[in-house]
Image: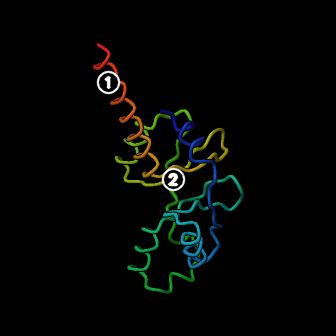
Amino acid sequence: MQIAHLLRRKGPGVVTVAPTAPVREALALLAEHGIGALLVAAVPGAVDGVLSERDVVRGLHASGPGVLDGPVSALMTAEVRTCVPGASVHDLARTMTDHRVRHVPVVEDGRLLGIVSIGDVVKARLDELEEERAHLVDYIQTS
């Protein structure tokens, strides 16, 4: 399965936050949308970074609660791994595992198309495996 197919099922919605926004505002967006990460973008469609719950927790541990009033850019992961819509779910799962990332923006020709989480990838892989199992069972029963 390709990432483009996964995005069609999931939808293209991406919640973003400006790099200058306070971390407290980013936390409110995470809670409001029930998500684990935000795309950080100074202009719509750009990818300046990713801010995850994990980034915030690490920032709180390192700097204390004052970090909540600081800018998102102070905590975001600026080196963002991206993928193209033609990438396979299997390859993206490997990349996410190898580089220990949980959220990957999908970009084509410099344009943001969506974001994929590790949960999306796991669900897609489970769906693929279930489909393969069903085909094998059908093959065995009709042979």
Q: How far across and down, in percent of the image, does residue 8 sit?
A: 60, 41
Relative to 103, is 90 above or below? Answer: above
Mark 2 or mark 1, earlier in chain: 2
Q: Is residue 86 above or below residue 68?
A: above
Residue sitting at 62 percent across and 68 percent down?
A: 19
Residue 44 in percent (x, y) is at 71, 56
Q: Quadrant of residue 14?
A: bottom right
Looking at the picture, tell me which residue is in the foreground, 73 or 13: 13
Q: Amino acid at mark 1?
A: Leu
Looking at the picture, which amino acid does disc 2 mark?
A: Val
The quarter of the displayed image where residue 16 is located: bottom right
Q: Residue at x 63, y 48 (%)?
A: 12
Give x and y (percent) for residue 57.
42, 74
Q: Nearer the viewer, mark 2 or mark 1?
A: 1
Q: Residue at x 47, y 52 (%)?
A: 117
Q: CA distance from mark 2 to mark 1?
A: 39 Å
Dot 2 and dot 1 residues touching (CB under 8 Å):
no
What coloring was used for the rendering? rainbow
Task: Specify few, some or many for label 2: CA neighbours under 10 Å numbering under 14, 14-19, or 20 or more.
Answer: some
Element marked by disc 2: loop
Q: Is 55 displayed left or right of 86 in the figure?
A: left
Question: Which labelled disc corresponds to residue 136?
Answer: 1
Q: Quadrant of the C terminus?
A: top left
Name the residue furthest front.
141
78 versus 4 height, above or below: below
- Residue linked to disc 2: 80
Q: Nearer the viewer, residue 131 or 140?
A: 140
Q: Residues within 10 Å of mark 1 (few under 14, many from 20)?
A: few
Q: Is residue 129 left or right of residue 66?
A: left
Q: Measuring 45% from the left and 38% from the top, which residue is drawn there?
A: 89
Q: Position of residue 10 (x, y in %)?
A: 57, 47
